[in-house]
């Protein structure tokens, strides 16, 4: 893979990260709630976007992971920058469409906003589901190269529904890894960055990996980290992740986000992209471009020195 870090490369990786969310969501959604053994006996190893599952999805159909990411991205682009109220409104409009799947904590937080206009849910010990983390990509794109903004916006958007330190930590760590990937840093650099999180939150440690892929954000992130660092390309990262079953649409979406940002567009199998609705692909590309333009990385004309050589 070319080791470059021009603004065009970064835009392309940004598109790949967003498309990665959709592809991972669609690939995993048909396997949600299954165990690895059930997947193996029913399908062998799943390498294609087959739809189905408990939601009886069409092949290529996406779920709440991609839809909530689109809500955030559309609100940012419509408002020409960060607007928490715009994001909450976008979530509310989405919930009114009666989406095919919504997490309990997501639903509670959005309903709370709709009823009381509250933009921040109170702390709740059960709010450590992965619902805030799965929709982090737009936050990472529009804050590219500012860790301070990333932290601020990650927590703001997360707290609309999820107010829990483990969810916050996962959102910030994932956003940080996506930033480094977009900028062309190496996996060893990403692994060092992740160590900072692991030293503060030991429960995210994923070596040895225990094979839990539930919707608890700790299990979700361990699954994504394990497969991302163990594999060497987008396809095997996603195949291994979703065949772990459990909350496979969300582990798939998050793995797709990170692997998309890291490996870029060339890494995403064409046969998977072809399964995603063409209009959706077009919209995702436009939103990704626009969010990168709004980011401090582009808008301040900042040139970030590339450490491309590390990527070897
Ligand atoms: P979402 O985060 O998508 O809104 P849920 O609220 O349904 O979804 O949470 C997802 C899962 O996370 C649930 O199975 C829930 O039991 C689990 N979970 C949430 N908080 C904790 C926690 N503190 N410890 C263990 N599991 C948790
Ligand atoms: Mg989902």
Image: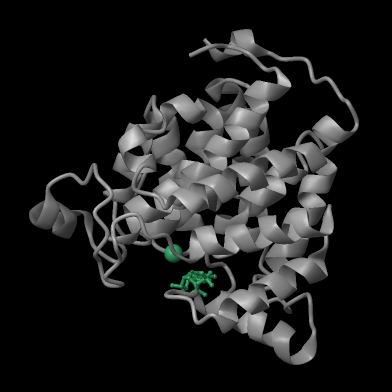
- Please state if 249 lies on the left or on the right of 271 as rendered: right
Q: Which residue is located at x 49 percent, y 66 percent?
A: 64
Q: Which residue is located at x 66 percent, y 67 percent?
A: 164
Residue 286 image offset from top left, x and y in percent: 64, 44
* Nearest to the observer: residue 282 or residue 252: 282
- Please state if 261 lies on the left or on the right of 295 as rendered: left
Q: Which residue is located at x 45 percent, y 25 percent?
A: 266
* Nearest to the observer: residue 176 or residue 71: 71
Residue 254 image offset from top left, x and y in percent: 49, 49
* Nearest to the observer: residue 163 or residue 99: 99
- Residue 223 seen in the current view: yes
Q: Residue furthest right?
A: 300
- Residue 207 seen in the current view: no
Q: Residue furthest front?
A: 279
Report which quarter residue 133 is drawn in.
Answer: bottom right
Q: Which residue is located at x 65 percent, y 72 percent?
A: 91
């Amino acid at each position: 893979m070319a080791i470059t870090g021009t603004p065009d490369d970064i835009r392309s990786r940004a598109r790949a990260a967003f498309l990665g969310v959709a592809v991972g969501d669609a690939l995993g959604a048909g396997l949600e709630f299954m165990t690895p053994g059930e997947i193996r006996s029913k399908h062998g190893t799943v390498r294609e976007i087959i739809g189905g599952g408990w939601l009886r999805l069409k092949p290529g159909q996406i779920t709440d992971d991609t839809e909530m990411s689109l809500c955030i991205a559309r609100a940012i682009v419509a408002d020409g920058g960060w607007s928490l109220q715009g994001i909450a409104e976008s979530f509310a409009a989405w919930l009114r469409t009666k989406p095919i799947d919504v997490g309990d904590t997501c639903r509670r937080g959005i309903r709370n906003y709709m009823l009381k206009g509250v933009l921040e849910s109170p702390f709740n010990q059960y709010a450590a589901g992965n619902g805030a983390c799965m929709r982090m990509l737009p936050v990472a794109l529009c804050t590219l190269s500012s860790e301070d903004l990333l932290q601020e916006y990650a927590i703001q958007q997360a707290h609309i529904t999820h107010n829990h330190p483990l969810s916050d930590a996962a959102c910030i760590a994932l956003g940080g890894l996506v930033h480094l990937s977009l900028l062309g840093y190496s996996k060893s650099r990403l692994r060092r960055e992740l160590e900072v999180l692991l030293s503060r939150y030991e429960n995210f440690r994923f070596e040895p990996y225990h094979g839990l892929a539930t919707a608890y954000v700790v299990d979700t992130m361990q699954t994504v980290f394990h497969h991302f660092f163990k594999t060497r390309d987008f396809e095997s990262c996603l195949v291994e992740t979703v065949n772990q079953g459990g909350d496979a649409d969300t582990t798939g979406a998050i793995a797709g986000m990170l692997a998309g940002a890291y490996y870029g567009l060339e890494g995403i199998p064409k046969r998977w992209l072809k399964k995603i609705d063409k209009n959706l692909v077009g919209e995702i590309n436009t939103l990704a471009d626009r969010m990168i333009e709004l980011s401090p990385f582009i808008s301040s004309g900042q040139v970030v020195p590339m450490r491309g050589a590390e990527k070897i």
